[in-house]
Amino acid sequence: RAQWFGMQEDGGITAFAIISISLMLLIMGAAVDVANAYRHQTQLQITADAAARAGLVSLAQGEDTAGARRATEAMIEKNLPRSRYGQLVTDPATELQILHYDATTGKLDHAGTDTPANAVLVRLQRSEVVDNPLPTFVMGIAGLQSWSLAVTSVAVLVPTRHGGNAEGIVARGRLDLGPSPEFGDGFCLHSQSAISLPIRTRSAGPLRISLPDPSGCAGVCALTAGASPSHPDTRPIAL
């Protein structure tokens, strides 16, 4: 009877199914852990961006560095309250900084009398350093008990100027300007894909038209077989 029992295969499929299902659950659990980590990383980044901008708005409204830091901390608490997400900042002096941005060199430095505060830096993290790592659900079986996440955001206040006829329109997709557009001299048009200028287009002077591929310009700016558009003021360039 023992020999007969050893030759039987009844129940073999059940063992295989158990192993397969277990592996599938582990893979699905790992996917959940990774997706959860990305979700929390995105939450941290959005909060850091919002906090940096809140501090910058405070500076623009005439607040001092202490007021800007309070606005930054308030925005962090509003988006990721400490009671729910734990501590996200270890040292406010280094992770919530009010700085000076030099638009000429593109560098950040300490704000002072000769270098007014016009930038806010925010660093947030969920890690062992703040005793607040993001726990995993299933990957702990493989030894990974938690994720360490960290993000940085910098917002700067730089001078701006009003646009005029010598400015332009920039589009990522197709730029279609309607049946009879009118432009000032030197107006710029740029698209990453295509531009359409109808026959009724009017301009006070040459237009500055650019695309990655100039052949993507249709209408009066379309290149003819002789490599010239039908209108002399609408020749597109590659950019």
Image: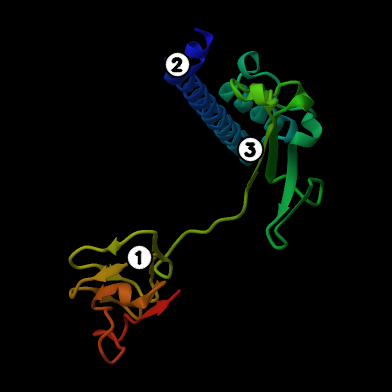
User: Mark number for residue 193?
Assistant: 1
User: Mark number for residue 52?
Assistant: 3
Above or below residue 151? Residue 174 is below
Q: Residue at x 18, y 75 (%)?
A: 199
User: Mark number for residue 98?
Assistant: none
Q: Tag 2's secondary structure?
A: loop
Q: Amino acid at mark 2?
A: Gln
Q: Earlier in the sequence, mark 2 or mark 1?
A: 2
Above or below residue 2? Residue 181 is below
What whole-number distance in Å separates the C-alpha atoms at marks 3 and 2?
A: 69 Å
Q: Earlier in the sequence, mark 3 or mark 2?
A: 2
> From the viewer's perspective, is the residue at label 3 or at label 2 nearer?
2
Say if mark 2 contacts mark 1, CB within 8 Å.
no
Q: Amino acid at mark 1?
A: Ser
Left or right: residue 177 versus residue 23 is left
Residue 114 % position (x, y): 81, 52
User: Mark number for residue 8?
Assistant: 2
Residue 134 % position (x, y): 65, 24
Q: Earlier in the sequence, mark 3 or mark 1?
A: 3
Q: Quadrant of residue 48?
A: top right
The answer to which of 234 and 63 lies nearer the viewer is: 234
Above or below residue 1? Residue 28 is below
> From the viewer's perspective, is the residue at label 2 or at label 1 nearer?
2
Residue 84 % position (x, y): 61, 15
Q: Tag 1's secondary structure?
A: loop
Q: Residue at x 49, y 7 (%)?
A: 1
What whole-number distance in Å separates the C-alpha atoms at marks 2 and 1?
A: 68 Å
